[in-house]
Image: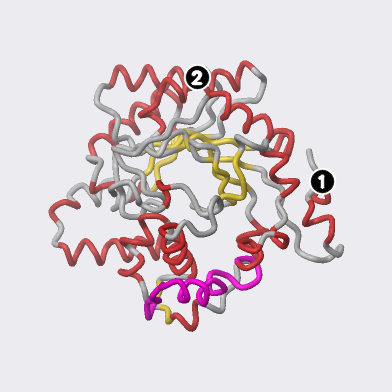
């Protein structure tokens, strides 16, 4: 397990200054492909999306996290929809178990893949044998546009029978009976319900959510948003998400890579991550997304009058920069900016 001073940024800071947190969790995004294309997606996942994380890449990241955080390390497997690449999902879990890395903390799914009870039981049992700790099933008004409620009910029942109720988490379980008929909602009713859900669930305005739901929830004047820095988000993230191509996203900040595990292993990336030494990260850390506004406007960006949050502003500016091939390879990949026919 690493000490905080092993990081370059932390080593220069006074004793009482905020430090870059140790990465203790990693979300391995096995694919951007998904059975759904939810409006609240933090990326631009969809059925036609691509990407498949190699088993050796996943295991390398898993082992590196264990070196970083020791026994406190937690790994979850997600997407996209990881059950669309089940053989790869299972292979990664089996390899981790064989190498003594432990079982996955959890696997995320939207249940959209469930068509056959026998096959679903087979998959749950196979994952159970690898030491999987929990299955997390996503369900809300956004998923309800794409995944029939009966599939969710079926997977919940099968998973509770195979794994036990205490190892099955439904997000959000209270919505299961209430949202059976989202398709029948009038457009205005649906928009209002989605706006309420983003507020109540604390949704993040990145990826597709920034483009489709950001304008719906935009109520903060630009002048108020540009004064918010991202010091806590940059330093305080306790983990990362790693996409199928090896891009490492700090915390929940999708579409901004601190590095790539194809060129540097995860624990090396943490030790070398110095936000004060890189212009992009230093601006975000000290001034927030508003720090990029003058530069973006000079390149042709047209600010909106209101935003849903500073994350909405950040995603909007980054999408503009991405189209200009600006700040590559930090601002990447296509699947975080909807530039593959979404």
Badge 1: how crowded within 10 Å, few (<14), some, or many (20+)? few
Residue shown at 40%/39% (left/top)? 32
Is the N terminus in the top left, top right, bottom left or bottom right quadrant? top right
Badge 2: how crowded within 10 Å, few (<14), some, or many (20+)? some
**Magenta portion: prevailing SS class:** helix
The span picked out in magenta is 284-306
Q: Position of residue 44 (x, y in %)?
A: 36, 48
Q: Is residue 134 above or below residue 339?
A: above
Q: Position of residue 30 (x, y in %)?
A: 46, 33
Q: Is residue 270 left or right of residue 322?
A: right
What is the secondary structure assignment of the residue under circle 1? loop
What is the secondary structure assignment of the residue under circle 2? helix
Q: Quadrant of residue 322?
A: bottom left
Residue shown at 57%/44% (left/top)? 248
Q: Which mark is residue 91?
A: 2
Q: Is residue 271 left or right of residue 212?
A: right
Mark 1 to mark 2 CA distance (whole Å):
32 Å
Residue shown at 83%/51% (left/top)? 5
Q: Is residue 152 left or right of residue 255?
A: left
In terms of depth relative to the viewer, which is nearer, 189 or 263?
263
In terms of depth relative to the viewer, which is nearer, 191 or 257?
257
Q: Is residue 7 above or below residue 132?
A: below
Residue under label 1? 3
């Amino acid at each position: 397990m690493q000490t905080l001073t092993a990081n370059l940024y932390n080593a220069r800071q006074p004793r009482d200054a905020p430090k870059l947190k140790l990465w203790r969790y990693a979300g391995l995004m096995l694919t951007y492909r998904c059975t759904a294309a939810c409006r609240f997606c933090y990326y631009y996942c969809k059925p036609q999306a691509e990407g498949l994380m190699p088993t050796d890449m996943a295991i390398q990241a898993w082992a590196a996290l264990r070196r970083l955080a020791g026994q406190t390390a937690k790994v979850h497997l997600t997407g996209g929809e990881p059950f669309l690449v089940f053989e790869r999902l299972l292979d990664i879990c089996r390899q981790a178990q064989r190498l003594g890395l432990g079982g996955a903390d959890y696997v995320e799914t939207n249940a959209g893949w469930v068509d056959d009870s026998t096959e679903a039981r087979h998959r749950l049992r196979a994952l159970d044998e690898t030491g999987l700790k929990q299955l997390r099933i996503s369900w809300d008004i956004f998923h309800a546009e794409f995944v029939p409620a009966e599939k969710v009910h079926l997977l919940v029942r099968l998973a509770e029978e195979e794994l036990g109720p205490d190892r099955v988490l439904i997000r959000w379980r209270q919505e299961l009976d209430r949202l059976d008929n989202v398709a029948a909602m009038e457009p205005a009713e649906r928009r209002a319900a989605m706006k309420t859900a983003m507020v109540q669930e604390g949704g993040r305005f990145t990826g597709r959510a920034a483009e489709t739901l950001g304008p719906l929830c935009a109520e903060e004047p630009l002048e108020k948003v540009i004064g918010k820095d991202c010091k806590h988000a940059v330093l305080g993230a306790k983990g990362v998400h790693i996409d199928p191509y090896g891009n490492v996203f700090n915390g929940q900040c999708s579409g901004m890579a601190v590095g790539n595990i194809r060129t540097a292993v995860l624990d090396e990336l943490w030790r070398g991550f110095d936000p004060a030494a890189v212009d992009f990260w230093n601006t975000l850390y000290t001034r927030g997304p508003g720090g990029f506004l003058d530069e973006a406007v000079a390149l042709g960006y047209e600010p909106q009058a209101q935003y849903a949050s500073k994350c909405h502003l950040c995603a909007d500016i980054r999408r503009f920069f991405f189209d200009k091939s600006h700040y590559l390879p930090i601002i990447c990949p296509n699947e975080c900016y909807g530039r593959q026919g979404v």
